[in-house]
Image: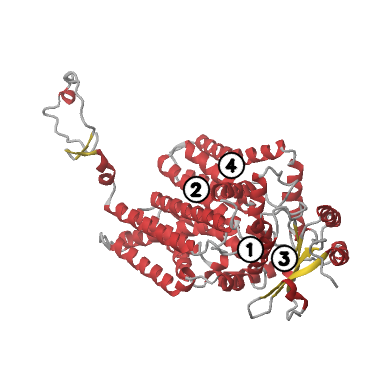
């Protein structure tokens, strides 16, 4: 019996067992019944949701607006090298280039297709990429809201969404960037939403879609394999707490989930196979990364973790403590065991995504944020449960008091960090987060080249700054756009260096940029020196110096262009040189 239909049966022939009267053919305006009162159907949705839900939806829209305004401040911030490389590769993919043959990265192909989608939708500019990732972040925020809302309550949802919105902006975890981990996060958020739907509605296709989502995250970055594992484990744990179901149901659920995971992986692998690059993919995405396993010891890793953790959590301490508090609260008996294990396992497996290699780079931490944010909603759920069940406190407005206190802390955070949010200094941020990496300088050099080069003029970089290829809309003359691969301590690097040299000599690029910066060249101990032995005479015989970027430590970089470079003597040991190829038109008389 529907609750919104009056239960009086005195004048209801159908309920009395009498034959129903024939329907009268009459055109009427569709209406909805609510409590016996006829209302317009346009109001049926609003009347069907609680006051709490309405308040939280208004707050969600407000939060989205705030995050939109903040992220718009970062639309023109220069790339760092990884995000520049992925954007460049996404553009190449759209041009018909073949992954792992015409370009490569030590990742599975999902990262190329994800960036290609962003380039396709938002354009091959810095502003376009940042705009695309802004929407990726907002979609993630919305997914987190509905996940936490489905599992706990609407207020838990808005707390989770707020946590995601601000923690994902943290500078030292590269929140302002278009890093691949933001792509991992959106698929993890999608997977968590499908889990919440499967948990409440028990429809098999939500289980399948959860697997597809985590499979997508894995294809963007392999660290997401831990969330794939979590998905399988949480299905098992949920089954153990539902004693009514036979074991066969668990086996079916795990098979459906696994089919979802492997379906997307199989599709991408099949595409690469059809392009004739499957063996190349295995080489670059599996064989080469094995050379870096074990490079960092456990003790070094712990040091990296501690220093990275301190930088990432600073200014965001409240959000981290509030989420992790759920682990402590889960020890109270009043908390449902399924929710306890959900929160603890999700945090643990999210943390595992940053562990491989013990590098603990800042942008790795982005992968933790979906789990951290959903568990923030669990903290609220735990507090309310403890107050109600352990202390018998059942005050209706108490949940709004909790939300108000949380909002006060969030507003205080924004106020204390308003310089970063409202008026970001790009160079100061990049220097603070990435040190002497030449990321601001790369954009300045690209601007010079864009102002002087013709569309047909080529470019080559001696340094690991592929973002310049993206800025200038030019192609690397070699598939080795990431210079660091050439100077890695792996046997194949000798062959790659000679291939790179042959490609450059054949292309005769108009501009050559040399990064005399150790953290851009990334030369590994015992690597082959062939490329550097070739470089000096090649530049001396074919190029003239037209630009100097003198990275003076503790000061702004000094840029010298054109004829002024002859009289300038660099102050710093870290200098970027821009060369232009000598031709009959531009040769300088001696």
Q: How much space separates mark 2 and mark 4, taking CA atoms? A: 13 Å
The residue identified by callout 2 is 190
Q: How much space separates mark 2 and mark 1, taking CA atoms? A: 27 Å
Circles 3 and 1 in contact, beta carbons < 8 Å = no
List the single residue furthest toward the left. 10
Q: How much space separates mark 1 and mark 4, taking CA atoms? A: 31 Å
Residue 542: image quadrant is: bottom right
Q: Element at badge 4?
A: helix
Within 10 Å of disc 4 (Cα), the crowding (few <14, some 14-19, many 20+) is many
The residue identified by callout 1 is 80
Q: Nearer the viewer, mark 3 or mark 1?
A: 1
Residue 385: image quadrant is: bottom left
Within 10 Å of disc 1 (Cα), the crowding (few <14, some 14-19, many 20+) is many
Q: Which sits earlier in the primary sequence, circle 3 or circle 1?
A: 1
Q: Residue at x 74, y 79 (%)?
A: 570
Q: How much space separates mark 2 and mark 3, taking CA atoms? A: 33 Å
Q: Element at badge 1?
A: loop
Please determine whether, in this image, residue 154 is positioned above or below residue 572.
Answer: above
Q: Nearer the viewer, mark 1 or mark 4?
A: 1
- Numbered circle sitting on residue 296: 3
Q: Is residue 158 left or right of residue 16?
A: right
Q: Residue at x 51, y 47 (%)?
A: 191
Q: Which sits earlier in the primary sequence, circle 4 or circle 3?
A: 4
Q: How much space separates mark 4 and mark 3, taking CA atoms? A: 31 Å
Where the N terminus falls, by quadrant?
top left
């Amino acid at each position: 019996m529907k609750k919104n239909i009056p239960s009086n049966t005195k004048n209801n022939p159908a309920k009395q067992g009498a034959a129903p009267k024939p329907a009268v053919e009459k055109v009427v305006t569709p209406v909805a019944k609510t409590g016996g009162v006829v209302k317009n159907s346009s109001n049926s949705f609003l009347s069907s949701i609680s006051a709490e839900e309405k308040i939280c939806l208004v707050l969600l829209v407000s939060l989205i607006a705030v995050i939109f305004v903040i992220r718009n401040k970062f639309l023109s911030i220069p790339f760092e090298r990884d995000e520049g490389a992925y954007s460049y590769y996404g553009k190449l993919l759209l041009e018909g280039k073949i992954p792992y043959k015409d370009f490569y990265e030590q990742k599975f192909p999902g990262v190329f297709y994800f960036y290609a989608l962003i380039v396709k939708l938002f354009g091959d500019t810095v502003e376009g990429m940042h705009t695309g990732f802004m929407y990726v972040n907002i979609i993630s925020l919305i997914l987190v809201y509905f996940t936490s809302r489905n599992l706990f309550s609407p207020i838990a949802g808005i707390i989770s969404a707020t946590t995601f919105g601000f923690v994902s902006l943290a500078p030292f975890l590269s929140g302002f960037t278009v890093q691949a981990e933001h792509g991992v996060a959106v698929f993890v958020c999608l997977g968590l939403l499908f889990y919440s739907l499967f948990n409440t509605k028990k429809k098999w296709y939500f289980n399948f879609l959860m697997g597809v989502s985590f499979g997508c995250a894995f294809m963007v970055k392999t660290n997401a394999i831990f969330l794939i594992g979590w998905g399988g484990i949480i299905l098992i744990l949920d089954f153990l707490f539902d004693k009514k179901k036979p074991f066969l149901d668990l086996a079916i659920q795990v098979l459906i989930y696994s089919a979802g995971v492997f379906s997307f992986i199989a599709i991408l692998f099949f595409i690469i196979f059809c392009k004739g690059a499957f063996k190349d993919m295995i080489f670059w995405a599996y064989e080469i990364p094995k050379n870096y396993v074990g490079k960092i010891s456990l003790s070094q890793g712990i040091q990296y973790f501690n220093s990275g953790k301190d930088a990432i959590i600073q200014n965001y301490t409240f959000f981290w403590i509030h989420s992790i508090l759920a682990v402590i609260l889960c020890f109270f008996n009043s908390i449902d065991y399924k929710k306890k294990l959900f929160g603890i396992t999700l945090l643990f497996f999210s943390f595992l995504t940053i562990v491989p290699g013990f590098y603990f780079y800042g942008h790795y931490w982005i992968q933790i944020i979906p789990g951290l944010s959903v568990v923030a909603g669990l903290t609220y759920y735990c507090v309310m449960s403890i107050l109600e069940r352990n202390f018998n406190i059942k005050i209706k407005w108490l949940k709004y008091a909790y939300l108000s206190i949380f909002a006060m802390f969030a507003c205080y955070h924004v106020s204390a960090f308003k310089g970063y949010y409202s008026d970001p200094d790009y160079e100061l941020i990049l220097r603070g987060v990435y040190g002497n990496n030449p990321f601001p300088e790369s954009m300045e050099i690209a601007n010079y080249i864009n102002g002087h080069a013709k569309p047909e003029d080529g470019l080559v970089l001696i340094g690991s700054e592929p973002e310049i290829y993206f800025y200038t809309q030019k192609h690397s003359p070699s598939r080795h756009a990431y210079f660091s691969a050439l100077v890695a301590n792996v046997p194949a690097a000798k062959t790659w260096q000679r291939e790179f040299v042959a490609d450059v000599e054949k292309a005769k690029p108009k501009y050559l940029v040399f990064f005399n910066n150790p953290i851009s060249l990334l030369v590994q101990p015992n690597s082959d020196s062939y490329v550097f032995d070739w470089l000096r005479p090649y530049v001396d015989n074919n190029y003239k110096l037209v630009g100097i970027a003198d990275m003076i430590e503790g000061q702004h970089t000094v840029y010298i262009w054109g004829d002024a470079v002859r009289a300038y003597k660099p102050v710093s040991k870290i200098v970027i040189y821009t060369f232009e190829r000598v031709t009959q038109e531009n040769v300088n008389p001696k």
